[in-house]
Image (tube, coloured by chain):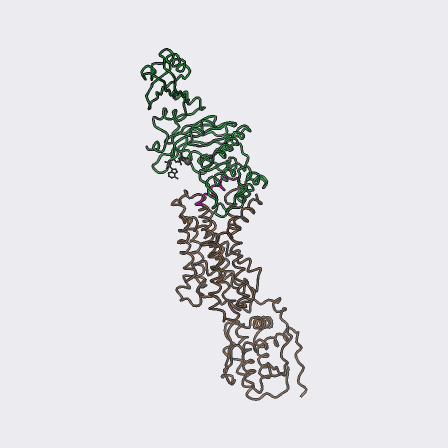
Amino acid sequence: MTTALLHHAALALRLNFRSRQAIVYGYLVPLFFLLAFGSVFRASEPPLLGQMGQLLTITILGGACFGLPTGLVAERERGVWRHFRLTPVPLPALLAGTLAARVVIVALAAAMQVALAHWIYGTPWPAHSWQLAAAFLLVCAAFLGLGLVVAALARDVPAVQAIGQCLFLPMIMIGGVGVPLVVLPEWAQRLACFMPGRYAVEVLQPCFNHPYGLRHAGLSLLMLVVIGAAAALAGGRLFQWDTGQRLRPRDFGWVGAAFAGWMVAGGVAVSAGHIGPVTLVGDAAFADIDDAAVSRITFEDLPPDDGIYAPLAPAHSTRRLTPRIQELIRHLDTWAPARTDDIGQNVRNLLCVAAIADIGQELSEADIARAVFERLRVQFDEDQLRRALAWVVLQPGAGTVVIAAPELGLRGEMSPAIVRERSTWYAKKFLGRLVGTIPDTPPDPD
Amino acid sequence: MTAVCVRDLGKRYGDLVALREVSFEVTHGEIVGLLGPNGAGKTSTLECLLGLRTPDSGTIAIEGHDAVAHPAHVQGRIGAVLQTTALQDAITPREALRLFASLHGQPRTRADALLDEFSLRDKAREPFATLSGGQRQRLALALAFIPTPRVLVLDEPTAGLDPAARRDLHERIRRRRDEGCAVLLSTHDMAEAQHLCDRIVIIDGGRIIAMGTPDELLARAGAPARIRLRARPAPTPADLAALAGARACTAVDDALVIHTIDCGDTLAALARHLAQHGHAILEMHVTAPSLEDAFLHLTGKSFGPEATKR
Ligand SMILES: Nc1ncnc2c1ncn2[C@@H]1O[C@H](COP(=O)(O)OP(=O)(O)OP(=O)(O)O)[C@@H](O)[C@H]1O
Ligand SMILES: [Mg+2]
């Protein structure tokens, strides 16, 4: 029977590629979305990378809302499934074959989008391809169940279009799939919690550009499982192999069950405060940095300690500190930005002090950097500090940065990007000393 | 064990009673024809049997398996041609046959052999959408012959076939019967039923109105044979109607048609009568009674679309 099912799935795939309509909907429309997104987001850095989750979600959604049910309803109308009924192979198995073929059809479209984005716009390849594959399958599973519900509700092929649009358009417009969640008003973000599209984006996107991939997408993964399981169960129960079959009143209970999955997910999300857009870049907190991540950091190509960039005074320097530096050090003990609730952010803010001094070409920039290092060691325990520094190194774009500190007597307002760069160098220099990879320079002879 | 046993089958579509108390059997090694005009309930009966429709009452057993309660048990046990077979536009006959062969657990060589047997070889790679009606029907038939079950259900199998294809199909069906297969087919072609079937079930308006071998049906219906005669000088119809076995005699154009229930007796008497009275025979035809006459006799209406009016 397995070979029969493979045969069936392979043939379904072949027939799909012979249908002009299927090619237009399955491949031309995704291509169009890619180009449309490309023309809007090509200037973002890196180009289009932050939109790939949305793009793939649109493709899967299209395959589920239109591709799958159109094919199923057309075959049902012709009586193909009545003929299947007469074979010894159970219909659920054949349906599974049809779904598998659809996953392949959609996967090819998604692969096409990823590859074309790379070649046309220079979008980097996904950072976590295996996780992407897994997330992709999960999203497919969740959405194809919906496609089955659409097929059950639609009496004929035109009805598939109508019903499919009822699912597709809201998710594109206000569900965080087409129009990004960030630019949506709060009410729409809230509404988007009750639609599966945003969770799909939230599990696909980090596979492209999040340093930790799916590690922080647990809630969204769970939502997709709930939504997908409800839809698949309902879609399976409602499957009709003959146009003569009509939905009975109790069948609408199953339709309700499919959408109950959305409600449950929305309720959980809202009560968990999972409403606004999740910052998808560099979102891993410092607490998630483990020893393995720390050990992967390398300390080559750091600027020398006595150079122009990110200089660092030797430990136990006997050089006399100017009163202004002594004042600054005293002030650092109680400096508010280093006293927030967030340890990682506190460390980052302190590093910014060294960075601002460095960029501002302070005369005693090296001493200030050393003072910051001392302050860090006093204020945080070693394990925390190691992980917080690693966090800054691994996720230079995460959190916020301080770009001016007049209260510490430092002049000027610096560019955030440069502050982040220098903070990272200092973080590396400090971390290297903390873990013993970089020997702390002996006291200055004079 | 009977191959197909249908008892008191009832089926309604809303207010329309499509089948009532339909009961019949088919044993292995016989061809049974379900004969009836359009809308008689043939397709309804056959599709209930195939598990494609659910009857409202009655029982159906296929080789002892309850087809109503456990349609899955009979799946794959019956080779079937449905009245309408439409496959995907883009599928080719070869692909369809290979797919269904693998679904039935048959080797691909069987699919390819059927392509030849149903003369579909030159259309093997053409999409279904471009096949003619008869070619589609041949493909549907080929699909039905993929499995080798001991029950065949064919809904109007010869519809749309040219005479040669029809003859081939009859031959093939007979061969299957001789191998011990039970064949149940529907048709509204009287001649086909009479010529092909071992037994006939006549159905009209959802009920069985007669059942038996073609000969039995003719005898039971008492349908007359017709003798058409032209002679000079013309005999009087009244004289001819009085001949042994004759029931009636009517003048049609310049000929006389004698209706008789005993053709042999009537012909002998007619020969004597003509000789005695010096009539010269110009032309004479004997038409054996047909199922059509039987149907007319049984239902009191002619066999055609108007017969479906209720
Ligand atoms: N799905 C249906 N819904 C409603 N009425 C139906 C349905 N199928 C059949 N009927 C009605 O039931 C009656 C029997 O139909 P059926 O198709 O069994 O006839 P048939 O003997 O196969 O006719 P034909 O020779 O035209 O194929 C007809 O009056 C038909 O209109
Ligand atoms: Mg019919």
In the rendered image of this protein, which colour is used for chain B? Answer: green
Q: Is residue B151 above or below residue B99?
A: above
Question: Could you tell me what secondary structure mostly forms the magenta stretch?
Answer: helix
Q: Is residue A80 magenta?
A: yes
Whether residue B71 appears in magenta in the rendering, the answer is no
Q: Is residue A132 visible?
A: yes
Extreme-top residue of the structure: B276
Compared across the picture, whether A127 is left or right of A223 comes to: right
- Magenta span: A76-88
Using the image as rendered, state which of residue B213 and residue A82 is in the foreground.
Answer: B213
On the image, the x and y values in percent for residue B202 come to: 41, 28
Residue A281 or B79: which is nearer the viewer? B79
Q: Residue at x 58, y 67 (%)?
A: A289
| Residue A278 picture location, percent across and down | 48, 66
Decide if residue B173 is on the left or right side of residue B13. right
Tell which quarter ligand 1 is in: top left
Q: Nearer the viewer, residue B301 or A374?
A: B301
Up the image or down, A221 lies above or below B61; here it is: below
Is residue B222 visible from the viewing direction of this image? no
Q: Quadrant of residue B252?
A: top left
Task: Give the brown chain's letter.
Answer: A
Q: In the image, is A192 to the left or to the right of B251?
A: right
Is A326 displayed left or right of A227 in the figure?
A: right
